[in-house]
Image (cartoon, rainbow, N blue to C red):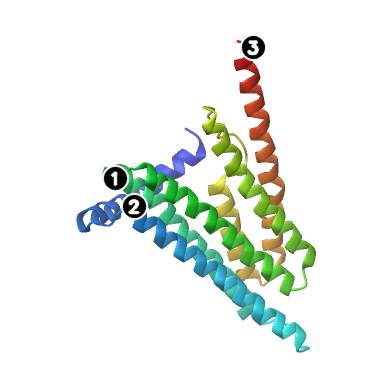
Amino acid sequence: MNYRDFIQKIIYVIINPLIKGMIKIGITPNIVTTIGFIINVAAAGLFVWTAKEYGHGLHTGMEPTSDSYYALVGWSGAIILFAGLFDMMDGRLARMGGMSSKFGALWDSTLDRYSELITLFGICILFIYANWFWMGIVTFLAMIGSVMVSYVRARAEGLGIECKVGLMQRPERVVVTAVMAIITGLTSNLGWLAAGMTLIAILANITAFWRVAHCYKVLKKTEEN
């Protein structure tokens, strides 16, 4: 059992009573997925609001050193973690309640992509307004990597290839983003969030090409046979 499966089992033990309650009152997986997306949009909005306030402080000649700016970044991270629970609950609800569907899987994957891109967009804006221009570029590279990791897997599965290899899949990216944002809020140091974005930008793009290489090996072996 790998670490992801172990952590997942622990979380399932915690959320199973809640899932059973959802089934009783008729909440569907698609509703849970949509709520998680809305929460992620709120987190992104908080990043953008922080960027606006931070940038206003810089342009008015008042260095924004107040901990309140960084506290907002920390709260954004906490909101992202909270939204991540909904991402786990929708799938669990679908399985336990016998409500799995092809459209539900499509809806979940679509909103996952939107959620992550909107969140990273908010962080990109934050860095640019904070005069961390190059970190805005790095965050954009993290956005590209996150999209390509998912795209290569989807394209591979369309070819009948299982493709889950790599170091920076979506759960890891969400945790890194959230935890680094929280640490930024606690330490009043934007460098932590910058480190998180750099890590995702590097490892997500490596993961995308790792998956391409994996598919190449599988397809080449298939053609030889």
**Amino acid at the residue labelled 3:** Glu
Closer to the observer: label 3 or label 1? 3
Which numbered disc flags the more N-terminal residue, 3 or 2?
Answer: 2
Q: Which mark is residue 217?
A: none
Q: Give the residue pinned by disc 3.
A: 224
Tag 2's secondary structure?
helix
Tag 3's secondary structure?
helix
Q: Give the residue pinned by disc 1.
A: 99
Q: Nearer the viewer, residue 220 or 57?
A: 220
Q: Give the residue pinned by disc 2.
A: 29
Q: Are circles 2 and 1 on residues that touch, CB within 8 Å?
A: yes
**Amino acid at the residue labelled 1:** Met
Q: Is residue 69 above or below residue 28?
A: below
Q: Position of residue 45 (x, y in %)?
A: 55, 72
Which numbered disc flags the more N-terminal residue, 3 or 1?
Answer: 1
Q: Position of residue 37 (x, y in %)?
A: 46, 60
**Amino acid at the residue labelled 2:** Pro
